[in-house]
Structure formats: C-alpha cells, structure tokens
Image: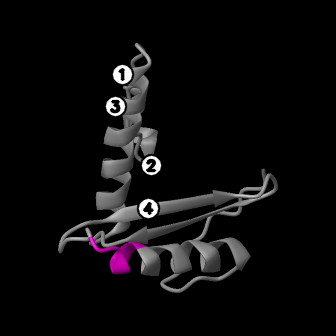
C-alpha cells in the first residue's frame, strides 16, 4: 500500500470522499447521540483513506485508536503497547 500521509480539512481523493459520505450516514442514524465520534478507514489495496469525525483534533483521535487497538489485541489474548518517540530524539542518547 502506498503511503503519502497528509492531512486536510476536506476530503481530497476518492477514498476520503467515500469515508466522508459514510460519516454523514453515521450522523443520520436514529441511534446517533450527541458526542458520538467515529473514524472511517478505507483501503483499496494500493492506498488508504481515513476520515476522523467528531474528534477535537488528530491527537485525541490517535489516542482513541490506540485504545481500541489494545482492546482488539486483548480480545485475541495478545498485548500491544505503544511508545511515543519525539521527532527530535537527539537528547535521548544519554
């Protein structure tokens, strides 16, 4: 899968336009409640698209994603841990 990570406030390609359309359906669902949030991921085997919907920022969404991944691994009897490494890790050499 090609990775050309970027962020945009509006859908920018076919996959993110489909993701965006799916979030509109999410909002119209009869059981939708204020404060519900979602992430929609799509993948066509060559590239991927994601729309974060209802999150205040990407950091908040990333934390939610990590927590969901931990739960998915736990449900399979596995453990996954995440460690943040700062971009400027030069001070970590000792």
Q: Nearer the viewer, mark 4 or mark 2?
A: 4
Q: Is residue 47 left or right of residue 9?
A: right
Residue 7 seen in render? no
Q: Nearer the viewer, mark 2 or mark 3?
A: 3
Q: Is residue 6 left or right of residue 9?
A: right
Q: Kindly identify which residue carries mark 4.
A: 39
User: Quarter of the image holding residue 44?
Assistant: bottom right
Query: Are the residues flagged by discs 4 and 3 in contact, CB closer than 8 Å?
Result: no
Residue lying at the far front of the rendered structure: 30
- The residue carrying pointer 1 sits among few (fewer than 14), some (14 to 19) or many (20 or more) residues within 10 Å by Cα, namely few
The circle drawn on residue 74 is 1
> Between disc 2 and disc 1, whose residue precedes?
1
Q: Main secondary structure of the magenta part?
A: helix
Answer above or below: position of 61 versus 71: below
- The percent position of residue 79, horizontal first and vertical second, equals 39, 18
Label 4 to label 3: alpha-carbon separation: 16 Å
Name the residue at 40% across, 46% down.
86
The circle drawn on residue 88 is 2
Q: Kindly identify which residue carries mark 3.
A: 71
């Amino acid at each position: 899968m090609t990775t050309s990570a970027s962020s945009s406030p509006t859908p920018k390609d076919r996959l993110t336009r489909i993701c965006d359309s799916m979030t509109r359906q999410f909002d119209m669902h009869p059981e939708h409640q204020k404060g519900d949030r979602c992430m929609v991921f799509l993948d066509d085997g060559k590239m991927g698209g994601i729309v974060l919907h209802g999150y205040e920022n990407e950091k908040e969404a990333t934390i939610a994603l990590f927590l969901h991944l931990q739960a998915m691994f736990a449900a399979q009897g596995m453990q996954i841990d995440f460690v943040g490494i700062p971009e400027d890790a030069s001070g970590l050499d000792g």
